[in-house]
Each structure stands twice: as structure tokens, then as C-alpha cells.
Amino acid sequence: MQYRSTYATYPESLAALFQHEKDDIDLFCRQTGVTCRCKLGFIIIKTAAESWALHQSALDDTILLYHKNTQDIPARPKAAVYEQYARYHIQDFYVESICYALGYVYLHELCTSRKEIPFEQLPPVMQEFLTYTKRRMERPDRHMRRNKRRALLKQQKKAEKARDAQRIEELIASLFPDSV
């Protein structure tokens, strides 16, 4: 499953992007029950309780995620610049790929319905999405200065080694309680 866009050249339209990711989208929909279809320049996403739309802005080709209003929602700063659609508001969300947006939508559904599902019981595509998102958030920003990023990565590796050493010491102590 590709949650991050990996294109030699970025597809010129949302429909082309949809066709490019079609197999992954179908797999995601089969496993989660979400429906996703391309219609008139929009990608319509529906869950059991919510409706969403992806649309490519005519201003700068940014792909925007719109959420259908179930109540009065105050406008967000991004909304002042981009196209508005009746009964929908723009989510503050950067769309990396359609599959990434589907993962976000499904997670949003779980959170708003307050369903507490253990990680192991989530559909495999959602387990993969959450793992990808967690790893992505742990990585330093790509645009960070090179030396600072390198130092941060070195610090993270050092902390991992210290945790591993601590676990080994605890294991040895549990195996040989008299030697401590």
C-alpha cells in the first residue's frame, strides 16, 4: 500500500491520480467498508456515517479534503483562499495520496464514533497506515538543516542503544538474580 506519493511525474488530474492508485484504493475499500469513487473532478469518499470529497484546486492544483458538515463549523484560515462548496468545509490536512486520505477518513470515523478497537483487530490496511504515520511523525523534518537533522538522528540512535542495553541488563538480572 502506497500512502506516500511516489510518481516519476505527478498525475495531471485527480482522475489520473485515482486511476494510478486504483488497486490500492480497491484493497482499502474492501478491508474497511469505505466507498470511494471518482465523479466530475471530485473523489467522493463515504463511510458509514460521514461523507467526504477530494478536489483539486484550480488556483494551484493543491488537492483539498472537504468534510460534509453535520453541524455549523467555523471557517478555517485555509478556507478563505480556496474554493468553497455548500455543506462542506475544508479539512486542515495535506493530501499525500488518495490512500493516505482514505486512512485519515477511516481514522476520523473511528475517533468521532468513539470506537475503541485494539490495534490487532483493525483491518490490515489501517494497521499499515498507523505504522506508516507513526514512523513519519518520528522522523525529523526533511527541510531541517542537514547538521541539525544528522545530530537529531544520532541522538535517537544513541537513545535506542541505551534502551536496548537497559533491557539486556534487566534480562540478565532476571536470569541470574544472585549475581546482582
Image (cartoon, rainbow, N blue to C red):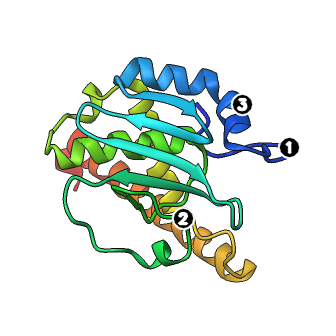
Q: Which mark sits nearer the N-terminus, 3 or 2?
A: 3
**Residue 48: x percent and y percent?**
25, 30
Counting every numbered tag in the picture gives 3
* Cβ atoms under marks 3 and 2 closer than 8 Å: no
**Residue 163: x percent and y percent?**
39, 59
Can residue 176 be seen here? The reply is: no
Give the left or right position of residue 151, taking residue 76 as reference.
right
Give the left or right position of residue 119, taking residue 64 as reference.
left
When the figure is inspected, residue 3 is found, relative to residue 79, above or below; the finding is: above
- Per the image, the residue denoted by label 3 is 20
Can residue 102 be seen here? The reply is: yes
When the figure is inspected, residue 51 is found, relative to residue 169, above or below; the finding is: above
Callout 3 amino acid: His
* Distance between mark 2 and mark 1 Cα atoms: 28 Å
Callout 1 amino acid: Ala
**Residue 176 circle label:** none
Callout 2 amino acid: Glu
Q: Residue at x 54, y 65 (%)?
A: 83
Specify the quadrant that holds the C terminus.
bottom left
- Per the image, the residue denoted by label 2 is 83
Nearest to viewer (mark 3 / mark 1): 3
When the figure is inspected, residue 28 is found, relative to residue 52, above or below; the finding is: above
Residue at the outermost front position: 86
Q: Residue at x 63, y 46 (%)?
A: 4
**Residue 8 circle label:** 1
Query: For this rendering, which residue is in front, 17 or 151?
Result: 17
Kind of element beneath mark 2: loop
Dividing the picture into quarters, in which one does residue 148 lie? Answer: bottom right
* Cβ atoms under marks 2 and 1 closer than 8 Å: no
Kind of element beneath mark 1: loop
